[in-house]
Amino acid sequence: MPRYIGKEMSRVDGVAKVTGRAKYAAEFRAPNLAYGFIVLGSVAKGTIKSIDTSEAESAPGVVRVFTHLNAPKLGPKASHEQSPPRAQEERDKSFRALQSDRIYFNMQPVALVVAETYEQARYASRLVKVSYNVEKHTTDTESMRGRARVPSLGPPPKPRGNPEAAMKSAPVKVEAEYRIPVEHHNPMEPHAAVAVWEGDRLTVFDKSQEVYNVRTHLASSFGVPEANVQVISPYVGGAFGSSLRPNYYPALTAMAARELKRPVKVVYTRTQMFTGHGHRPYTIQKVALGAERSGKLTAMIHEAVHNTSTFEEFSDNTTGFTRQVYACPNLYAPTLIAATDLPTPTWMRAPGAVSGMFALECAMDELAYTLKLDPLELRLINYAETDPESGRPFSSKALRECYRLGAEKFGWKNRKFEPRSMRDGRLLVGWGMATGIWGAFQMPASARITFKADGTAHVASATSDIGPGTYTVITMIAAEYLGLRPEQVKFELGDTGLPRAPAQGGSWTTASVGSAVHGAALAVGAKLLALANQDANSPLKGATAADVEMLDGRLRLKSDPSRSVNIADVMRRNNLGEIVETFESRPSEERRKYATMAHGAQFVEVKVDSDIGQVRVTRAIEVTACGRIINPKASHSQEIGGVVWGIGMALQEATEIDHRYGRIMNPNLQHYHVPVNADVHEVETLFVEEEDTVVNPLGVKGMGELGMVGIPAAIANAVFHATGRRVRELPITPDKLL
Amino acid sequence: MRPFKYVRASDAGAAARAVAANPHAKFLAGGTNILDLMKEDVERPNELVDVNRLKLSEIKTAREGGVVIGALAKNSETANHPLIRQNYPLLTQAIVAGASGQLRNMATNGGNLMQRTRCQYFYDTAMPCNKREPGSGCGALEGLNRIHAIFGWSDKCVATYPGDMANALYALDAVVRVRGANGRERTIPVNDFHRLPGDTPEKDNNLAHGELITAIELPKSNFAKNSYYLKVRDRASYAFALVAVAAALEMDGNNIRQARVVLGSVAHKPWRSREAEAALAGRAASEESFRRAAEAALAGAKPLAHNAYKVELGKRAVVRALMRAARLV
């Protein structure tokens, strides 16, 4: 019986966070620190004609003003200067600031003012005068739709079966277009870096979801060996994808620090964040579904077009999960990209999936109404027993159970089919549902355990904890398999001095890093067993590593716990103060025989005051099947957060661009709306646990993104049910319901 | 933020004189708007005269009946004051519909009247805005104008006054008491306090430079039993209104003796609809008469490219607010 796994545990870093002891990137200090403030450009495309920094340079406290005219060039050196060449650098086309006079997007950094204080730098930044040679820009994805193309990375979209013919002959069809605006992550913590050079060695305190990635970017930016660069990011105040890539500010900060020979700090303002880390792309989707009268899907055509930048390709893979969610023999689901003069988009919580499933799950609801079938029934009719894309079995899939449990908890059977048929006084009531889906990914990851004779352990891996509770869950896993209490385990992360871990993205951290820690813990046990069995009288003679477990200071036989050794004694006899084991876990061969996915079912109730277009999500039931739940407390928090985000995406969030200027007009939290507490009513999250021995040694699947995937569609479907009005363009604001 | 001189005023006269003496000086009260705008480089005063220590925060009964609220009384204190809750519940409702608890604890009544527009183009110094920079043009006129004016705008400016409190004050016929640098006090009916943009959108109101708001007088009224503040917005709280309605009725049985209908976030100032009020006076309270009033209220609306919805929303909001005020829903 597990002692910790599966039981609620409060965050081990909670006290540090609420008392301010947890240090975030901008809070690190260094002697003689200077402060940089970024100056943003005001046109969307063209070149810088002139830039006058004289007034700024003579402002009080200003140390230097960097522009493309005096900033050193960053980036990989020519190949003959490089040894050895690295493939990864070739791919790193990410935007670097102040490298030329070229303007790629509005609100692009055009100068960095460095001063003795933040206030001085911010003031002087207003004194920099820039003029431009303006070129005609395009920021409207709608107008570039005709020039959308298949992304060059990844395989070209391949139809399954004969979707066009099947669509033509389908007895029942629906077809519609759906739109999602540009959205921004808006984590609470602004992005920041503190850069410190000592000779050719660079230390950067950053807000990052992948310190190793930032290290590679910085090393190639400055032409120094990776070993000379250390990136440290112990705490992240939310990121949601906005810190997956190396954003432009760490290299900019390090450049200034190197030139000035003193540490420099740069912190984005909220406004600077809007062009400083990418965004969820503007996505246009056309969905056509063909079905038999029974509801059985015969054809699915789901085409997405979204923006990328002119200098880099980004694909959100909007239609990826369409291929795997329902059984259907004929399918075509391409995602195309169109270049616009906006910054490169990036992954934002549940990237692709939440956008794609918004369109598909609304279309499924439209099909249900065309067929006069209950929307849940339609999903069950098209339930995929095996992966429709590969034909492989699922390693586990409890979606049917999620539907059943969710419907029961929600009271779905009491739903009246007809729109506008349910009321609460003068309010229209709508019930909607949708399916959630996400991959159960696993990435190579390493972890090191230092197991000490005093019965404590230090666990280390260069992953991050952007909020899901990684500090806690890894501590639980280590405590479980080392037989220690959680307070005897100290887990350290977010530092390139620690074993390599993948980005904290894709909801794969616990599966990847957790498996590495599990492996390292077993290696510690194996080492102890070998040491114990050097003693001729060892009670564990003949046992293999798989036969033993550690518990409360003893290594014991699982089948006969009375046969055990005292771990401290074994270590003392061998003069060992500590045992250090590093383990790299990789996805197993076995996994390849299966499709590994996580699923969920979402049911929501809205109440609509149709006179004034006001929608309230009064109830949400979210049922999730994502393998084994390690920490129910944090897991529920994750799923609640997903629901809340889904409410924001459905009803509020939109980055507004004035296409005349190619400029974002609401880059602040007064104009860009996210849900407030008053928008969030009853939210109930439930888990259907799956026993999955294939997916990874811990049997866990990611949940952080999954929790929001179906919510926007479920809300839009509920709004239709309440009002009879199908809103296919998010967000569903009051003006769209009048 | 640009460097500025900070002065703490010891009395109202000194405060008014200090600001009057410097064309680039401004008063500082709660600071919930001006400090944000200074950080964004939208406001660029070179001197702030802090009036927070002045004794202008009393809320008391006036001699002629009615209530006088100090300019420096906090929004939250005002909304929760028994005299206001009992006699002017419309004002309480309007105040608590605005901002957040934290902001209302800082914001003063005088400062709230001075709140500047929330037009995105006003906030972005890279964009044209005649209000921020006269002569630079109006970015919103043909730009993103979903939140902008449908009444009283000019081709120089389509911004709205964003606040809630003032909408109620307009309905309650409040009077603003101000003190000039010369020590003279004068009163301005609140309905004449804010301006329409015309050719000078940089002027939000009719205060002379250096005039300090000292108090707001609320005349005795009979609206307390039948008033309602309705705010329609993009989320449940902490968002500016798309359309707001302050509705007040003085009833005689089921008949309306007199009415007040003020729409918020539809013009450069709270938009009092005399047409709707005339349509209501002497009528029976009914959904039908409220609909007629709503039609009258929105008849003169001139929507822009992205805010035509405000016309229909405005009508429905007027009906709803009146129905609530009349306790018919």
Image (spheres, rainbow, N blue to C red):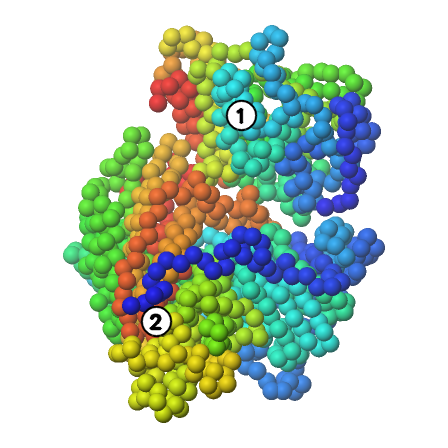
- The residue carrying pointer 1 sits among few (fewer than 14), some (14 to 19) or many (20 or more) residues within 10 Å by Cα, namely many
Task: For marks 1 and 2, give the CA distance.
Answer: 56 Å
Instruction: Say which of A44 and A644 sits in front.
Output: A644
- Could you tell me which residue is drawn at 68 percent across and 45 percent down? B39
Label 1 residue SS: helix
- Could you tell me which residue is drawn at 60 percent across and 64 percent down? A206
Q: Is residue A451 above or below residue B243?
A: below
Label 1 chain ID: B
- The residue carrying pointer 2 sits among few (fewer than 14), some (14 to 19) or many (20 or more) residues within 10 Å by Cα, namely many
Residue A139: quarter of image: bottom right
Do we see residue A293 in this rendering?
yes
Place of residue A16 in the rendered image (x, y in percent of width and height, measured from the top left): 54, 57
Residue A438: quarter of image: bottom left
Residue A698 circle label: 2
Image check: A356 left or right of B48? left
> Can you identify the residue that label 1 sits on?
B79
Label 2 chain ID: A
Q: Residue flagged by tag 1: what amino acid is it?
A: Ala
Place of residue B133 in the rendered image (x, y in percent of width and height, measured from the top left): 71, 39
Which quadrant of the rendered structure holds the N terminus of chain A? bottom left
Q: Is residue A74 above or below residue B250?
A: below
Contact (CB < 8 A) between labels 1 and 2?
no
Residue B151: quarter of image: top right
Do we see residue A276 in this rendering?
no
Place of residue A721 in the rendered image (x, y in percent of width and height, measured from the top left): 28, 43
